[in-house]
Amino acid sequence: MALGGVRVLELAGLAPGPLCGMILADFGAQVVRVDRVSRFAEAHGDVQARGKRSLALDLKRPQGAAALRRLCGRADVLIEPFRHGVMERLGLGPEVLLQENPRLIYARLTGFGQTGKYAKSAGHDINYLALSGVLSKLGRKNENPYAPVNLLADFAGGGVMCALGIVIALFERARSGRGQVIDASMVEGVAYLSSFLWKSQKMGLWSQPRGQNLLDGGAPFYEVYRTSDGKFMAVGAIEPVFYKQLIKGLGLNLDELPTQMSVSDWPGMKKKFASIFAQKTQAEWCSIFDSTDACVIPVLSFDDAASHPHNKERSSFIKNEQGEMSPRPAPVLSRTPAVPSRKRDPFIGEHTEEILLEYGFTKQEIAKLYSDKAIGFKNLKANL
Ligand SMILES: C[C@H](CCC[C@H](C)C(=O)SCCNC(=O)CCNC(=O)[C@H](O)C(C)(C)COP(=O)(O)OP(=O)(O)OC[C@H]1O[C@@H](n2cnc3c(N)ncnc32)[C@H](O)[C@@H]1OP(=O)(O)O)[C@H]1CC[C@H]2[C@@H]3[C@H](O)C[C@@H]4C[C@H](O)CC[C@]4(C)[C@H]3C[C@H](O)[C@]12C
């Protein structure tokens, strides 16, 4: 696989870091998740542990921190998901680790970045989304701004953006032979993703208040409608050629309607479309719109998405040995595609000895680390 042979140490954190590690593991990297020893009961469950192994190491103990330094000496990538200053307090800051391994790619995945007034503040997806400006653009007319689960800052602007940075740094290292520090701020990651919104401000796409523009819930032809069986259809018929097919599928006469881009008529048109969509079931609307260019697609549950003919044809969702469904890695590379592990997720500390041996520790050294309580072997299933 494309990242075969790349050694990654992922310090266990919440949501974004685990996704970053999973992406690298799916594309072939050997990812070791470094879990806490003393707080098994409080482990933030890593539900994105596919393809990883787990080493339980107490970084608060000098022997544990020293062991991580040694591991980093042989690793290609370190992913650290803590607030600014934590690694420095552990004696594991970039200056130390890059001194010992100049090829190390030291990825610092935080909410606010390594500098700035909030650098040491706690936060979660919704806070980063707020500070980026993006949250102000999300939400229905006359309602509060709305954060779409924790997809945008944690995952899109965090885990995925950090993985991109790591791959770019690996590519550059192939030329220079040198590692570097990646300051992956989720605020900036999600802001970067929203460049289109920033650049299109003057195009008139966002001249209305939140929830009343073309792409944020204002336009009747870019909206979700309830069907008679309580399901929904997603409509995205933006271009006139597709809009015409939407109108035809709804059984309306284009000549008798206001022009598509008559913004003042959008609320009335929305009501009209809603009353029509409410007359048929989701399946009936699919039989009308499937294989047309009306840009009308059923809103699917996770189960329905996994079993939908289109997604089944592409094997877009996979099952692991436990029968758990999840999305397959994306994108699909033609020659070196990701081959996601089908194995169950690792227990915390399950591979401690195996990993330490692999990284050059002797059995005696491992026994000493264990007696110093710097490592753990417990086979506890990570929570959540
Ligand atoms: C599923 C829920 C999460 C959903 C995602 C959520 C919406 C997010 O946005 S996640 C993104 C959060 N932000 C970041 O990741 C940005 C960078 N990180 C931070 O800003 C901070 O880490 C923090 C704010 C996220 C957390 O701050 P905290 O003070 O806890 O930590 P830090 O300051 O970073 O310091 C880390 C300290 O830990 C020490 N450490 C680290 N590793 C080790 C080690 N191996 N050995 C020893 N010590 C270690 C390190 O030295 C630092 O120490 P110091 O501070 O002394 O320097 C989940 C959200 C909440 C979860 C639930 C909750 O946790 C309670 C239960 C816990 C139980 O175990 C499992 C079930 C829970 C219900 C749990 C379930 C889910 O996981 C959650 C709901």
Image (cartoon, grey):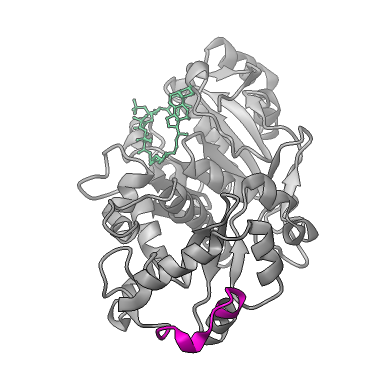
State the image coordinates of residue 309 (x, y, percent, origin top left): 77, 59
Q: Which residues are magenta?
A: 247-259
The C terminus, quarter of image: top right
Q: Is residue 130 left or right of residue 310?
A: left
Dividing the picture into quarters, in which one does residue 346 lie? top right
Would you say residue 252 sits in the magenta stretch?
yes
Q: Residue furthest left?
A: 117
State the image coordinates of residue 13 (x, y, percent, origin top left): 47, 35
State the image coordinates of residue 274 (x, y, percent, origin top left): 47, 63
The N terminus, quarter of image: bottom right
- In this rendering, the answer to whether 359 lies above or below 352 is below
Query: Residue at horizontal 23%, vertical 50%?
Result: 116
Q: Nearer the viewer, residue 251 or 305?
A: 251
Query: Residue at horizontal 30%, vertical 46%?
Result: 127
- In this rendering, the answer to whether 67 lies above or below 288 is above
Would you say residue 93 sits in the magenta stretch?
no
Observer able to see residue 327: no
Q: Residue furthest bottom?
A: 255
Q: Is residue 150 left or right of residue 245?
A: left
Instruction: Assign ligand 1 to one image quadrant.
Output: top left
Q: Nearer the viewer, residue 108 or 177?
A: 108
Q: Nearer the viewer, residue 292 or 145?
A: 292
Query: Residue at horizontal 51%, vertical 46%?
Result: 101
Observer able to see residue 60: yes
Q: Nearer the viewer, residue 16 or 28?
A: 16
State the image coordinates of residue 166 (x, y, percent, origin top left): 52, 56
